Amino acid sequence: MKRTKIIQSLLYTCVIFGLVLGTSIAESALANTNDAYHFGLKKSRDGRPASISQEGFMELLKTHGAVFLGDTTKKELYLTFDNGYENGNTIQILDVLNEKRVPAIFFVTGQYVKEEPELLKRMVKEGHLIGNHSWGHPDMSTISDDRIEEELDKVQIEVAKVTGQWQMEYMRPPRGIFNDRVLEISSKLGYTNVFWSVAYKDWETNSQKGSKYAYDNVMRQLHPGAVILLHSVSQDNAEALGDIIDDARKQGYTFKRMDELDVKSYQ
């Protein structure tokens, strides 16, 4: 009995010490787990769909109904933008989408919600979806279940206050980092996790390489059912977007909104 009390006392002391340091024992342990994945894929070439068959997490995405690819038998494309913060390009992007009559989904963080309410209102007014990219953009695999829920709930509530979009069905894990627990919790909260099958290194604002670079990187990866990830901070993307849309259409592609994706492919 005495030994049990000593162990309990030590455990209690450890918990208090963890709280003093600003983190719980549980979250410290989560930070050291090795079960997290960084989303990656084999890129498309010559119109063949991208593949995650060698990445080790395909069954995990299937289990939780996550999206990375639509119907590979139809020449449909889904435009998605990550909006962590505003860099002066979103107005141009929205102008192009409006002119071309193309829908998109914008995954926003708390910073974007706080600083760009008028752009959020415009997105919804012009028929686009707003998705959840978390409030503070953390690595969700390292935070507690409660923190994950708080990160997502706060975005949903604040976006609704600004735009009236009370229903938020899509979520993109920050940094593309996830594990079974992250997908399970977000799914239980009613989210479909959305990854991508077309992307390139476009987020470095000090390393933009021109609209042709953006255009070439996107166009060479196009394939039926593609979910295209673009970062709105990229000037290259904003300048290339119109040509990407026009030339994709010339190849027979149509652009769909994420809530029109009714077939999820995994390969």
Image (cartoon, helix red, strand yellow):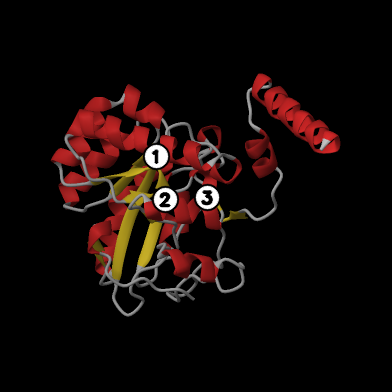
Looking at this rendering, what residue extends furthest in the top direction?
Answer: 20
Q: Is residue 235 visible?
A: no
Taking the spot 79% from the left edge, 30% from the top edge, the residue there is 10
Taking the spot 56% from the left edge, 55% from the top edge, the residue there is 179
Q: Position of residue 260 (x, y in %)?
A: 22, 63
As drawn, is 52 to the left or to the right of 127? Answer: right
Label 1 packing within 10 angstroms: few (<14), some (14-19), many (20+): many
Say if mark 1 contacts mark 3, CB within 8 Å: no
Taking the spot 30% from the left edge, 53% from the top edge, the residue there is 243
Q: CA distance from mark 1 to mark 3?
A: 15 Å
Identified by mark 1, the residue type is Leu
Identified by mark 3, the residue type is Gly
Does dot 3 land on a helix, a strand or a loop? helix
Does dot 1 land on a helix, a strand or a loop? helix
Q: Which residue is mark 2?
A: 186
Q: Quadrant of residue 69?
A: bottom left
Label 3 packing within 10 angstroms: few (<14), some (14-19), many (20+): some
User: Could you say which is closer to the camera, residue 171 or residue 185?
Assistant: 185
Q: Quadrant of residue 40?
A: bottom right
First of labels 1, 3 by sequence position: 1
Say if mark 2 contacts mark 1, CB within 8 Å: yes
Does dot 2 land on a helix, a strand or a loop? helix
First of labels 2, 1 by sequence position: 1
Identified by mark 2, the residue type is Ser
Instruction: In the rendered view, tell whether residue 229 sits above or below residue 15.
Output: below
Q: Position of residue 85 (x, y in %)?
A: 41, 30
Q: Position of residue 24 (x, y in %)?
A: 64, 31
Q: CA distance from mark 2 to mark 1?
A: 8 Å
Q: Which residue is mark 3?
A: 176
